[in-house]
Image (spheres, rainbow, N blue to C red):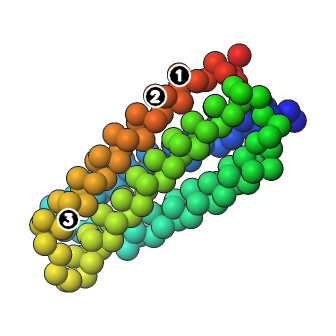
């Protein structure tokens, strides 16, 4: 498999993980991702475990991408390097988003366990999460603009 084919494969794998994250995000919004959900019967522990699991998958994929870059970076042409760097940049922003989601869900879980969590602390976590979504979307647009470099 040549480098362009490997980059395509990595892109599809990243897209699969993005889809998994979006499904989790949507599930959380529907079931228990907001402060008011503390007044409903929600399994916050399950949601928190789901967040940990997706974070684990993202960290494994990131190691693989960085390993590919380290082992093959000198063999990539300029377009391939540009695309790979942007793919990693997008993925890193997405990983930050997952960490902020995890933080937000940890706060909700703690609150569901009767620990003291203030509205301001939760609101800060929510704002960080929302900003991180904007950040990964911006990197995603940049990545989409480079698709022609490897998807011809």
Residue plotted at (80% across, 40% down)? 74
Q: Tell me the quarter of the picture where residue 34 sits.
A: bottom left
Image quarter (top left, top right, bottom left or bottom right) of the N terminus: top right
For disc 2, the neighbor class at 10 Å (few under 14, some 14 to 19, many from 20) is few
Label 1's element?
helix
Q: In this view, does 89 lie to the left or right of 100?
A: right
Image quarter (top left, top right, bottom left or bottom right) of the C terminus: top right
Q: Tell me the quarter of the picture where residue 120 sits.
A: bottom left
Residue on which the image places disc 3: 122
Label 3's element?
helix
Label 2's element?
helix
Q: Which of 97 and 21 is in front in this view?
A: 97
Asked whether disc 2 touches disc 1, contact meaning CB atoms under 8 Å apart, the reply is yes
Residue on which the image places disc 1: 145
For disc 1, the neighbor class at 10 Å (few under 14, some 14 to 19, many from 20) is few
Vertical placement of residue 69 versus 33, above or below: above
């Amino acid at each position: 498999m040549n480098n362009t084919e490997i980059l395509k494969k990595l892109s599809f794998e990243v897209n699969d993980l993005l889809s998994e994250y979006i499904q989790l995000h949507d599930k959380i919004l529907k079931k228990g991702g907001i402060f008011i959900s503390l007044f409903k019967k929600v399994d916050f522990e399950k949601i928190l475990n789901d967040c940990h699991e997706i974070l684990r998958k993202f960290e494994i994929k990131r190691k693989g991408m960085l390993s590919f870059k380290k082992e093959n970076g000198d063999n990539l042409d300029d377009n391939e390097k540009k695309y790979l760097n942007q793919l990693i940049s997008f993925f890193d922003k997405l990983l930050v988003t997952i960490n902020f989601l995890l933080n937000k869900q940890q706060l909700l879980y703690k609150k569901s366990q009767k620990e003291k969590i203030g509205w301001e602390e939760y609101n800060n976590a929510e704002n960080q999460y929302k900003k991180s979504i904007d950040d990964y979307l911006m990197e995603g647009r940049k990545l989409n603009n480079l698709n022609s470099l490897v998807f011809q």
